[in-house]
Image (cartoon, coloured by chain):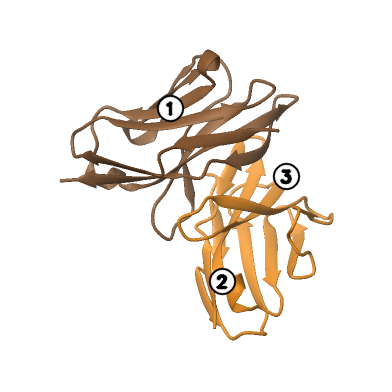
Amino acid sequence: GAVVSQHPSWVICKSGTSVKIECRSLDFQATTMFWYRQFPKQSLMLMATSNEGSKATYEQGVEKDKFLINHASLTLSTLTVTSAHPEDSSFYICSARDYGGQYFGPGTRLLVL
Amino acid sequence: AQSVTQLGSHVSVSEGALVLLRCNYSSSVPPYLFWYVQYPNQGLQLLLKYTTGATLVKGINGFEAEFKKSETSFHLTKPSAHMSDAAEYFCAVSDRYGGSQGNLIFGKGTKLSVKP
C-alpha cells in the first residue's frame, strides 16, 4: 500500500517549452501533496505544499508563476514548469501524505536543452 | 526552527562491517524523526521513523536507529553492511501538530559506499 507514482520518469525538452509532471497517490487519498527539487548530490528542497482544491503554498524563493501546481483531486497533483530553461534541469520528487504518513514518488528527471 | 545535521557526506565501509550514519537535530519540541534511503535516480524510501514510545526503532533491511533526547541525536546503524546498502541516506525531522506530522526538514544526506 501507500504507493505514489510520477509521470514521466524522464523528460528532455527544449528551452522555452513547458513541461507537466503528474503525481498520483495510487491506493490512498492524500490530504496534502508536496513537490521537492533535488540538485545533484544535494538534499531535497521543498518547493511547495498543496491541499486538494486550494492554492499551493510556495516556499520562499520559488517562483509560483514558473512552477505551476494544480491539485485537482485527492489523488492527483501536477507540476508544470513553464518556459523551461537549462537552470530548471533537476530531479523533481513529489510526495503525498495521509494520516498514516508521508510517501514519496520515484522522481522525474528533467533536462532542458 | 527545526534543522537536521548529518555528519559526514560520505561514509565508506567494508562488506560485513558496522554501518553508523550520524544525525543530530534541532527542535524546540519533541519531533518526529525519520531515516530515508535513496537509490540512484529513484525517490525516497522510508527506512524507519520515531514518533513516540520506545527510543530504539527497528526498520527495514536490518537498520535501526536510537532516539537520544539528551544528545539530540538519531543515529542510524546496521550491524553488518551488504553491498546492496550502498545508497544515499537522509535523516529528516518534522514537527508534531496535534499528533499529526508536520512538514519534513531533510538533512543534506550521507552517501554510503560498501567495499567488497
Q: Identify the element where label 2 is drawn.
A: loop
Find numbered disc 1 in the image and state the secondary structure of the residue it sits on: strand
Residue B28 is situated, as x and y percent measured from the top left of the image, at: 69, 23
Q: Is residue B99 left or right of residue B86?
A: right
Chain A visual colour:
orange
Between the C-alphas of marks 2 and 3, the distance is: 29 Å
Q: Nearer the viewer, mark 1 or mark 3?
A: 1
Left or right side of B76 for B27: right
Q: Earlier in the sequence, mark 2 or mark 3?
A: 3
Name the residue that disc number 3 marks: A31
Mark 1 burial class by Cα count in 10 Å: few <14, some 14-19, many 20+:
some
**Residue to which mark 1 is pinned:** B75
Confirm whether circles 2 and 1 share one chain: no
> Which residue in the protein does label 2 denote?
A89
Identity of the residue drawn at 71% across and 33% down: B1
At 66% from the left edge and 78% from the top edge, which residue is drawn? A84
Q: Which chain is brown?
A: B
Per the model, the C-alpha gap separating discs 1 and 3 is 30 Å
Label total for image: 3
Camera-side residue: A85 or A55?
A85
Nearest to the observer: residue A47 or residue B23: B23
